[in-house]
Amino acid sequence: MMRKTFLVLLGAVVGAALTLAISQPRVIFAGMSANAAGSADTYRQLNLFGDVFERVRADYVEKPEDGKLIESAINGMLAGLDPHSSFMDAKNFKDMQVQTRGEFGGLGIEVTMEDGLVKVVAPIDDTPAAKAGILANDVITHLDDESVQGLTLNQAVEKMRGPINTKIRLRIMRKGQTKPVEVMITRELIRVRAVRSRMEGEDIAYIRVTQFNEQTTENVKKAIADLSTQITDGKLRGYILDLRNNPGGLLDQAISVSDIFLEKGEIVSTRGRNTEETQRFGAKPGDLTKGKHVIVLINGGSASASEIVAGALQDHKRATVLGTRSFGKGSVQTIIPLGSGNGALRLTTARYYTPSGRSIQAKGISPDIEVMQDVPEELKARADSKGESSLRGHLKGDGEEQTGSQSYIPPDPKDDKAIKMAADLLRGVVTNSAFPPSPKRAALPPQQQQQ
């Protein structure tokens, strides 16, 4: 078995919510043995594809480009598997690599494809999309008066990118409004600030992680160090780690961010079709928060990498999870380069599991303490995220699937009931049986509890 080098993206930077792993190019030997390369029926189907391909080339009303025909066929094959598998041409593959570095040109918007239209997962903070008022769950129907119907997600994303200081017009269908909304946005160089931090009063450290790119772990460490200097020794009551509306990012960053708060134990495992492909990732000694109380905030927009962090800290009883149920994206997509200039496959190859062995696919992480926000009347129609289970063709979850949950965050922190509840718990103003969690009650297999 060829060893995989994991650069895993758990969620969308500009794309569908994903878990991605980089793999070395694979060599496939196509022999005539049915046992080695598939049944005779498979070869007949491939011959059928060849017949259709040749018929289109010969008889289509306009001469098609062979490359586009092949690319469309590959995209169709992958799109028929699940919402997160796709083909990236060389440019899109390069763009994906740029995005994981946390800097790219465009609008600053995370999107997915639903029913042939582009749906907003969330605008990235402090970007043109956020400043223009783009909201989670907005459905983009046109780009510069051109319908997105019939485009792949990668093609739609490509059209939203362009030179800095150029403009693009988005036509949006917004739940609760009968007429389309048109928004003109000027493209900028997007530098994703993945981590923000501040003092909550004089005794609580607040850290918000908006996505998991290559800088996230170091930025979280820096935030912890900076906040520690602002609080007098002995006065720090704990940390609020805000992962709400965080669509994900790199797996190694989700693991290393989790490790910041853990001394030992498994963080996450990935399990493919074959048992020998199972991989387990564990924590190293050294809790940078020195055992201080931690409360993790999640909601319906928290996906993939966010769910790995929340699930790991919840299972180890290292943190209390507060908010609403998360998105439920629990599958792994492996990036398989196809050789120089040929792009890459983004293929679902595994599911991931929390330390206790639970899959959150199409179910999400349920908070220890549910806190619902007060949503303004005019926003109630679009305050909820539908979740993974609503995506057509999604991988089925283990057991009963769950729909999405509330994803609204009040723009003014003073109105944020989740932050207020977290702060009150840390200060002892209110009590709840779920806080603080007891490590002795960690939901882990016996072998992990004995470590």
Image (cartoon, rainbow, N blue to C red):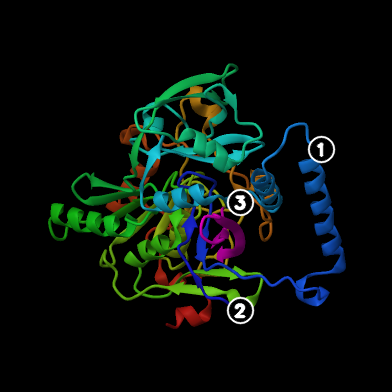
Q: Is residue 335 left or right of residue 130?
A: right
Which residue is at a point 71% across and 52% down the rendered structure image? 77
Q: Would you say residue 49 sits in the magenta stretch?
A: no
Cβ atoms at labels 3 and 1 below 8 Å apart? no
For disc 3, the marked residue is 86
What is the span of residues highlighted in magenta in the rendered image? Answer: 329-352
Q: Which residue is mark 1?
A: 59
Quarter of the picture containing the C terminus is bottom left
Residue drawn 80% across and 58% down?
Answer: 46
Identified by mark 3, the residue type is: Ser
Nearest to N terminus: mark 1 or mark 2: 1
* Residue where numbered disc 2 is placed: 276
Q: Amino acid at mark 2?
A: Glu
Sort mark 3 into few (<14), some (14-19) or many (20+) by Cα contacts within 10 Å.
many
Indicate which label's residue lies in the foreground, 3 or 1.
Answer: 1
Horizontal and vertical percent position of residue 184: 43, 22
